[in-house]
Image (cartoon, rainbow, N blue to C red):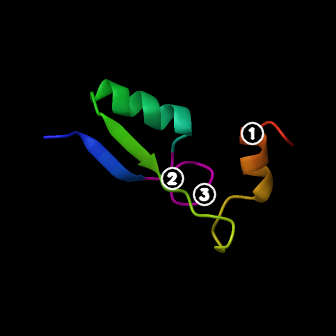
């Protein structure tokens, strides 16, 4: 059996309570093999601000 979670949100949107790093550390602690970050995209009302994604790429 695989230990995966294919629906993880982060602080970037209004659905999560942890950062990407915290989600990764939680998954590692639980010996999970895969997580998928599923924050909402820019087209949705509750999506992170555009600059959030730019900062992740260090363009802002």
Q: Position of residue 26 (x, y in %)?
A: 38, 32
Q: Circle 2 sits on which residue?
A: 16
Q: Circle 3 sits on which residue?
A: 13
On screen, residue 12 versus residue 20, left or right, reads right
Quarter the C terminus occupies = top right
Nearer the observer: mark 3 or 1; the answer is 1
Q: Residues within 10 Å of mark 2 (few under 14, many from 20)?
A: some
Quarter the N terminus occupies = top left
Q: What element carries label 2?
A: loop
On screen, residue 58 versus residue 24, left or right, reads right
Q: Position of residue 16 (x, y in %)?
A: 51, 53
Q: Upstream in the sequence, badge 2 or badge 1?
A: 2
Q: Where is 56 relative to 47, above or below?
A: above
Residue under the image location 74 percent in, 49 percent down: 52
Residue 57 is tagged as 1
Q: Does the magenta stretch include residue 13?
A: yes
Residue 17 is tagged as none
Residue under the image location 63 percent in, 69 percent down: 46
**Contact flag, marks 3 and 1 (Cβ < 8 Å):** no
**Contact flag, marks 3 and 2 (Cβ < 8 Å):** yes
Q: Where is residue 12 in the image (x, y as percent from the top left)?
A: 63, 51
Q: Is mark 1 on a helix, strand or loop?
A: loop
- Which region is colored magenta? 8-17
Residue farthest left in this picture: 1
Residue under the image location 49 percent in, 52 percent down: 9
Q: How many marks?
A: 3
Q: Upstream in the sequence, badge 3 or badge 1?
A: 3
Between 15 and 34, the one lying in front of the other is 34
């Amino acid at each position: 059996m695989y230990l995966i979670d294919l629906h993880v949100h982060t602080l970037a949107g209004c659905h999560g309570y942890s950062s990407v790093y915290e989600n990764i550390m939680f998954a590692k602690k639980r010996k999970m093999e895969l997580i998928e970050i599923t924050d909402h995209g820019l087209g949705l009302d509750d999506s992170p601000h555009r600059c959030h994604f730019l900062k992740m790429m260090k363009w802002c």
